Image (spheres, helix red, strand yellow):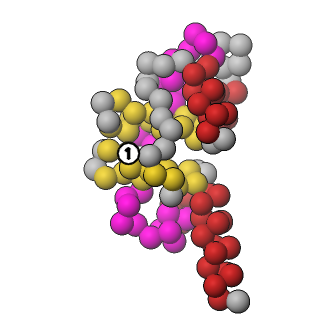
Amino acid sequence: MSASPTTIGPDESLERARERMTAAKIRHLPVVEAHRLVGILSDLDLAGYRGRLGETRADVAMTPDPVTIGAEDSIESAARRMLHRRVHALPVVDGEQLIGMLSVTDILEDYVRASRSRS
């Protein structure tokens, strides 16, 4: 899990979202309002707004009420949820407050670490 993830507000532009994704080298960006998770943007969400990123707000392109996972949930539970819901990242929440992001890359890295320790 990436703690303290990069976020964006719902009223900020998709251009700003793209800039933050590029700078942080991420493909998923939680949308947060008043410390509460309200949506998520992916790099694929931005594709439909090319040429209009500067004039389009994040809340227009975001997926509202994203699939989430709690900090106490297992990595296996997260992987199953990702597979079932066909998503590549899950916001990690405590109630409605975002505390981290878990991506497919995080799960693969965990798998590789576990595999090495068994060898």
Asked if one can make out residue 67 in the rendered structure from this viewpoint, the answer is no
Q: Is residue 71 above or below residue 5?
A: below
Instruction: Decide if residue 59 is on the left or right side of residue 54.
Output: left
Residue extent of the magenta highlight: 53-79
Please report the residue visible at 38 percent of the width from the left and 49 percent of the height from the top.
99
Image quarter where the C terminus lies is: bottom right
Task: Please tell me whether residue 13 is drawn above or below residue 94 in the rendered image.
Answer: above
Instruction: Tell whether position 65 is magenta.
Output: yes
Q: Is residue 78 magenta?
A: yes
**Picture coordinates of residue 116, whole percent (x, y):** 68, 81
Dot 1, how many residues are within 10 Å of its Cα: few (below 14), some (14-19), or many (20+)? many
Q: Position of residue 67 (x, y in %)?
A: 45, 49
Nearest to the observer: residue 87 or residue 97? 97
Amino acid carrying label 1: it is: Leu
Residue 26: x and y, percent?
Answer: 63, 42
* Quadrant housing residue 27: top right
Rendered view: 67 above or below 55: below
Near-viewer residue (52 or 112) = 112
Q: Is residue 2 left or right of residue 45?
A: left
Asked if residue 61 lies left or right of residue 119, the reply is left
| Residue that badge 1 annotates | 98
Image point (51%, 53%), residue name: 2
